[in-house]
Amino acid sequence: GDTYIPHSYWYSTAATTGKRGMQLCFTARGDAAEYEEMMQTAVDRVKWTLTFYQPGTFSARPQAHIMTLTHMDNTNVCNCKACSAIVEANGYSNAAVQILFMNELARRVEAWFEEPNCPGAAWKDSFQLLFFAYNHNYVAPAYYDATTKSYKLYNEEVRLHDRVIAYFCRESNGQQIYDGDRYFDAEETNKDFKSAIQAWKEVSNGQMNFWNYGTNYAS
C-alpha cells in the first residue's frame, strides 16, 4: 500500500542500480526516525495478526503463533554504511543485521504481552518469530575458538531472543556427493555444513528450525 512508498530507507542499497530495493534494509540506512517507524510498523503488524486470529474466534488460526519475517530469494543484500558496519563487526555475517532487528521486534512484542488486558495474551506462551538463515544469511555471527574448541559470538547482542528462531537451510541437496562412480567421504563433504550448524547452535542457544530439500535420485 501507500504506507511504504515514501520510506525508501526501508529498502536495500546495492552496488548495481538495477538491484536496489530487492531486500529490506534492517537498519533503515542508519536513520533513527526511519528505523523507529519501520520497527513500529512491524510491531503493529504482529499485534494485529495475533489479535485477529485469536483462539476461539471465527477467524482462529492455530498456526498464527508462528510468524516469519524472511528475505527475498536473492542475494542482493543491503550494503549501506549502517548495515556494512554491523556485518564487519560480526565476522562479515550479513545475518547479524537482521538478527538485531528481530531481537528488538521480539522484545517489543514481549512487552506488549505484559500489558494489562493484552488482546494477544492467548499467544504469550507460544509466540515465535522466524527468519531465514540461508543465502546471504547462511553464515552465523559466530567464530570457532581453537583454544576452547567451541563457537563464540562476536557480540552478545546477536544471540537470538528466546522467541526468535533461525530457519536454517542447506542450499545443496543431499548430504553426500556422488561423482558417478562413488560417494565422496561424507565427513569431508559436509564439513562446511557441520560448521555452519555448530555456529548457529551457539547463536540460537540450540533452538533451530530446518528447511530441507529432497534429492532427485532419477538424475
Image (cartoon, helix red, strand yellow):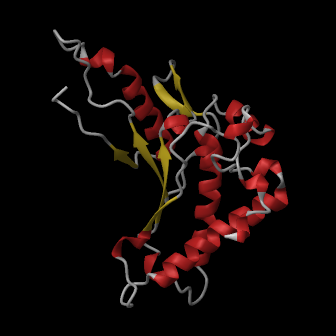
> Which residue: 44% across, 76% down?
123
Q: Vertical placement of 136 versus 50: above or below?
A: above
Which residue appears at 49% of the width and 83% of the height?
52
Q: Quadrant of the C terminus?
A: top left
Q: Position of residue 91 (x, y in %)?
A: 63, 28
In the rendered image, the vertical position of residue 81 relative to residue 147, given as above or below: below
What is the count of numbered marks? 0
Quarter of the picture containing the N terminus is bottom right
Measured from the top left, where is residue 185 in percent x and y?
24, 13
Q: Is residue 190 left or right of residue 195?
A: left
Q: Residue 17 is drawn in which quadrant?
A: top right
Q: Is residue 27 visible?
A: yes
Does residue 203 appear left or right of residue 156 in this picture? Answer: left
Residue extending furthest toward the front: 18
- Which residue is situated farthest in the top direction here? 181
Front residue of 68/128: it is 68
Q: Position of residue 183 (x, y in %)?
A: 19, 14
State whether residue 22 is above or below residue 150. below
- Looking at the rendering, which quadrant does residue 80 occupy? top right
Q: Position of residue 25 (x, y in %)?
A: 69, 49
Q: Tell me what residue is drawn at x 64 percent, y 29 percent.
A: 92
Q: Is residue 156 visible to the viewer in this orientation of the structure?
A: no
From the viewer's perspective, tell me whether residue 205 is left or right of residue 18.
left
